[in-house]
């Protein structure tokens, strides 16, 4: 088993302890009952709990922190991911952020370098990973045809029956299975993905 698979299993195990996951999709999208009762923790609380226990989501949390107003402490993305409105977050792994930083020529990728892209770009990228509603895998992926989903930044992703996603940059993204889909938060759903989706061509 490679490092990526070990990390995916570890995350899945931690998430099972952090929030009840009545059902998750397998690699073919079968046996994926939609969890009924929402979890007790919101999206940010789940990501933070996983980070505390495994170190995962360090890059994602660092990227979100880039948008905190130093005077007021307000953060629009945190507001969305902790609010009462139901949303779905496609959460890239740390490896996904590391790969992006490497592709951009960053030496020694690290979470604290995510802010180097500038707040406007970071906000555009982060809001491209959030869509409205509690969207479980059976809603995200149509089993018969491609499906377009509008994200919070106004751009679109296209999902396919084989559980892949295409972004504006033409990248192919997949859920980080097992345990990486249908994570049921109190205010929405998390799907862990293996690539940072980009709302612009590189």
Image (cartoon, rainbow, N blue to C red):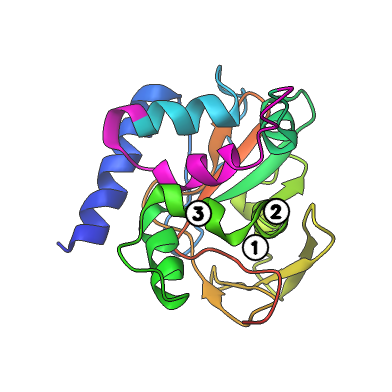
Q: Is residue 183 left or right of residue 67?
A: left
Is 153 within the magenta?
no
User: Residue 186 location in percent, x, y?
Assistant: 63, 23
Q: Residue at x 55, y 20 (%)?
A: 41
On the question of residue 24 being in view, the answer is yes
Residues drawn in magenta:
52-72
Q: Residue at x 79, y 52 (%)?
A: 152
Q: How many numbered circles are shown? A: 3
User: Residue 15 location in percent, x, y?
Assistant: 38, 32
- Give the labeled residue for mark 2: 139
In the image, farthest residue toward the front: 71
Q: Are marks 2 and 1 in contact (CB under 8 Å)?
A: yes
- Give the labeled residue for mark 1: 141
Q: Which mark is first along the chain, 2 or 3?
A: 3
Q: Nearer the viewer, residue 31 or 52?
A: 52
- Give the labeled residue for mark 3: 114
Q: Is residue 25 left or right of residue 50?
A: right
């Amino acid at each position: 088993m490679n490092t990526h698979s070990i990390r995916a299993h570890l995350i899945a195990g931690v998430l099972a302890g952090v929030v009840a996951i009545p059902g998750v999709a397998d690699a073919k999208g079968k046996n994926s009952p939609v969890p009924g009762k929402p979890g007790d923790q919101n999206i940010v609380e789940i990501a933070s709990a996983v980070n505390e226990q495994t170190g995962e989501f360090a890059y994602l949390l660092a990227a979100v922190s880039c948008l905190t107003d130093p005077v007021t402490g307000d953060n629009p993305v945190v507001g969305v991911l902790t609010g009462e409105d139901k949303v779905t977050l496609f959460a890239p792994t740390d490896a996904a952020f590391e790969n992006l930083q490497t592709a951009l020529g960053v030496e020694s990728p690290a979470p604290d370098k995510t802010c180097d892209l500038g707040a406007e770009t970071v906000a555009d990228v982060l809001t491209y990973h959030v869509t409205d509603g509690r969207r479980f895998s059976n809603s995200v992926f149509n089993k018969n045809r491609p499906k377009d989903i509008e994200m919070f930044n106004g751009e679109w992703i296209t999902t396919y029956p084989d559980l892949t996603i295409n972004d504006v940059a033409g990248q192919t993204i997949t859920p980080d299975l097992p345990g990486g889909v249908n994570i049921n938060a109190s205010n929405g759903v998390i799907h862990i993905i293996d690539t940072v989706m980009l709302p612009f061509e590189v």
